[in-house]
Amino acid sequence: MTTRPGPRERLLDAARELTYSQGVQVGVDAILKQADVARRSLYQHFGGKDGLVAEVLRSDDNLDRYRRVMDEAGDDPRERVLAVFDELDAITAQPSFRGCRYTAAELTLTDPGHPAHAEVRAFKEGLHRLMAAELTRHGHPAADAGADQLLVLIDGVLAHAVTRPGARPALAARALAEAVLAARA
């Protein structure tokens, strides 16, 4: 017998799916309907839609996914970084791909006080630290600057793949990532 998740988990699952497929401006009623919960549950668990959107971003496992991809590539920092671009190639080729949920939220939410902005920045900073650590292990002479370059490539792949489906921008970005990795102390 399978136990149905509680209202909090159902709200998160529904919001995670709908905010990705339809954007963070998706209506509360659509989220409540898909989650099959009462409006009271939204306010009880998240204080409202803003809190729910922030929690969706906070609880997403994208940073862990990057780590898993890198770990599966082995111990060589160069191969670990390049594996990210191989994974991005696979992700962006999926018909359900809609771009980076973090960048989309950042661009859509115009209220500077929205709690999702802090979650977006935390994710991007975490990804920067992850890349900088690999570049440091690789012997890169300017790991922070190199990580900035890799993040520009990652963000570019995620945006370009939405605007030009089938273009496979991760392959082009992978070649550029190799140039970033070529800088050695």
Image (spheres, rainbow, N blue to C red):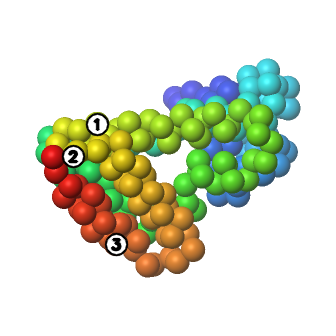
Residue 36 lies left or right of residue 98; in this view the side is right
Q: CA distance from mark 3 to mark 1?
A: 23 Å
Identify residue type, mark 2. His
Would you identify the image quadrant in which residue 40 lies? top right
Identify residue type, mark 1. Ala
Which of these two is toward me, 117 or 29?
A: 117
Residue drawn at the location 42% of the way across and 41% of the way down: 127
> Badge 1 is on which residue?
133
Image location (x, y in percent) of residue 174:
30, 65
Query: Circle 3: is it few (<14), some (14-19), or many (20+) Cα within 10 Å?
Result: some
**Could you tell me if the residues under marks 3 and 1 are in contact, i.e. CB atoms within 8 Å?**
no
Q: Nearer the viewer, mark 2 or mark 1?
A: 2
Q: CA distance from mark 2 to mark 1?
A: 10 Å
Identify residue type, mark 3. Ala
* One can see residue 72 in this view: no
Residue 39 lies left or right of residue 103; in this view the side is right
> Badge 2 is on which residue?
140
Which of these two is toward me, 31 or 71?
A: 71
Which of these two is toward me, 126 or 66?
A: 126
Image location (x, y in percent) of residue 57:
60, 38
> Badge 3 is on which residue?
172
Residue 20 lies left or right of residue 46; in this view the side is left
Closer to the chain start, of discs 3 and 2, is 2
Q: CA distance from mark 3 to mark 2?
A: 21 Å
Closer to the chain start, of discs 3 and 1, is 1
Residue drawn at the location 74% of the way across and 26% of the way down: 46
Q: Secondary structure at mark 2?
A: loop
* One can see residue 84 in this view: yes
